[in-house]
Amino acid sequence: MIEVTLLGTGSPIPDARRAGPSTLVRAGEQIFLVDCGRGVLQRAAAVGVGANNLTALLITHLHSDHIADLADVLITRWVSNFDPNLPPLPIIGPPGIAEVVESTLAAMRFDIGYRISHHDDLTAPPQVEIEEVADGVVWGRDGVQIRVGPTDHRPVTPSIGFRVEHGGASVVLAGDTVPCQSLDELAAGAGALVHTVIREDLIEALPMQRLRDICGYHSSVEQAADTAARAGVGILILTHYVPAIQPGQEEDWRALAATVFDRQIEIGDDLHRVQVHPGVGAKPAG
């Protein structure tokens, strides 16, 4: 089984009820954090996961709302772990992630220096292992395999999605994207697809062009559902709602997705959990 927890279902616009985009994936004994929007560690703490419990950090793209709490993840993991042999944190993301991580650590250099000076057991800065990738298998440890495929979030490029497989269960995390063949291929036959969505009908009615612009590089609810249907996935998990879903509106969003996708549809607030079991999904990945 793979367990998916929607840590943050929000957007760049601060929301009192929703943290920034982030998803937690538990596969066997391994815990993967996919993107790290604002408030991610507070949400993770609510399900008993700390920064030092993370197996790896997976980043879909370099928009600010998806990496806003990168410094918090790096520094908190470093200062809250008392294992002298703490391994470096693997960080997997698209080309450019190395520069972002290095710049983040450089920005925190005063804090890092203060802590090293004050604590005898902190002798080096936070340690990371960065892998920049746009396609292919990027992880294969203890029965968990992770594969990456390109998505289409132009002009944000490159952007990637992740497919996590364990024990016959599989989950694809699309990140921000419009429909594209490469995502269809990555998601083919998956047990679940976690997809960011916007309500294009609501956004297009807004008077501000800058807000309407987001329709050009995000999937609508119906488009995400169509991707799930084409790929033959078992469960569609919606997240990163724009505009934010208000209490009582969940069934409106579900109904839109159901016009295209006739299988299980999950919509929830932060901390919503979904279990994905082996065998869920219509066809093998191809």
Image: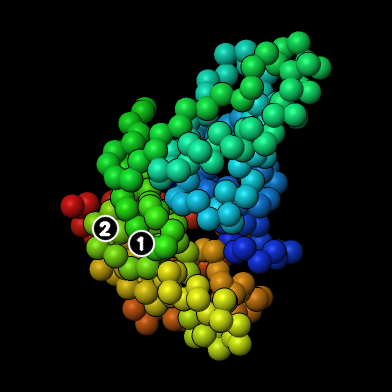
Quadrant housing residue 249: bottom right
Q: Quadrant of residue 54?
A: top right
Residue at image position (57%, 76%) is 210
Taking 278 as reference, is 261 above or below it?
A: below
Q: Is residue 168 left or right of residue 120?
A: left
The residue at which mark 1 appears reads as 152
Question: 51 left or right of 79?
Answer: left
Can you tell which mark lies on residue 31? none
Residue positioned 68% across, 13% down in the render: 123
Q: Is residue 186 visible?
A: yes
Residue 74 placement (x, y as % from top left) = 62, 34
Kindly report the distance in space between the C-alpha atoms of the residues bearing marks 1 and 2. Answer: 9 Å
Q: Name the residue under label 2.
A: 182
Give whichever of 268, 151 is nearer the camera: 151
Compare residues 210 and 273 and report the one nearer the observer: 210
Amino acid type for the residue under numbered disc 2: Ser
Answer few, some or many: residues within 10 Å of disc 2's Cα (few below 14, many 20 plus, some between 14 and 19).
some
The answer to whether mark 1 and mark 2 are in CB contact below 8 A is yes
Q: Which residue occupies the foreground of this view, 220 or 258?
A: 220
Q: Residue at x 37, y 68 (%)?
A: 178
Question: At which x and y percent is residue 163?
Answer: 35, 48
- The amino acid on which the numbered mark 1 sits, given as a three-letter code, is Asp
